[in-house]
Amino acid sequence: MHADSAPLAAAAARRHELTRSRAIQALRELDRAGARVTFASVATAAGTSRSWLYTQPDIRDQIQHLRDTTAKTAATTIPARQRATDASLRSRLAAALEHNRVLAGENARLRRQLACVLGEQRSARHRSGNDQAR
């Protein structure tokens, strides 16, 4: 390599990194917006070519992953910021289970209370002689 070509190589490397960052940013923005992520949509948003995207293994893998993910949920596209995480789903499940436990305890308490009141009514009827044959 000649000494004169060093600035050209540096400029090419900067241009490559700038293009990569634009592609990654476009990919994130499309996903965040809940838009369909495809090679064409990322290339258009980043101002690059689809063929260049295919030559970048990490970007290609991300696009394929998001494309497959969004294809499965195309009918119910939810933006990334609104998607539930596994941790939040587990938290909601734990809260629902705790709420169910509390309600079951309250139901049991109310049934015992009702049984006591009905027993007292039956005893009162029996003592007053108003117990009717059924």
Image (cartoon, helix red, strand yellow):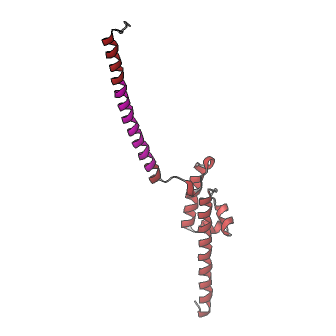
Residue visible at 61% across and 88% down?
Answer: 7
Residue most extreme to the top: 133
Expressed as whole percent of the image width and height from the top left, the position of residue 8 reads 63, 86
**Residue at left 54%, top 66%?**
58
Q: Count the labels in the image.
A: 0
Q: Nearer the viewer, residue 34 or 126?
A: 126
- Residue at the extreme bottom: 3
Query: Is residue 111 a member of the stretch shown in magenta?
Result: yes
In front here: 83 or 60? 83
Instruction: Out of 66 and 132, give the one closest to the viewer.
Output: 132
| Prevailing secondary structure class for the magenta stretch in the rendered image | helix
| On screen, residue 82 above or below 95 | below
Q: Which image quadrant is residue 48 in? A: bottom right
Where residue 38 appears, x then y in whole percent? 63, 59
Residue visible at 59% across and 76% down in the picture:
17
Residue 13, position as x, y percentages in the image: 59, 80
Q: For this rendering, which residue is in front, 54 or 118?
A: 118
Task: Name the quarter where the C terminus is drawn.
Answer: top left
**Residue 78 magenta-drawn?**
no
> Which residue appears farthest toward the front when viewing the image?
128
Q: Is residue 64 above or below residue 19?
A: above
Q: Is residue 67 left or right of residue 113?
A: right
Give the quadrant of the N terminus: bottom right
Percent position of residue 68, x then y: 57, 53
Part of the protein shown in magenta: 91-115
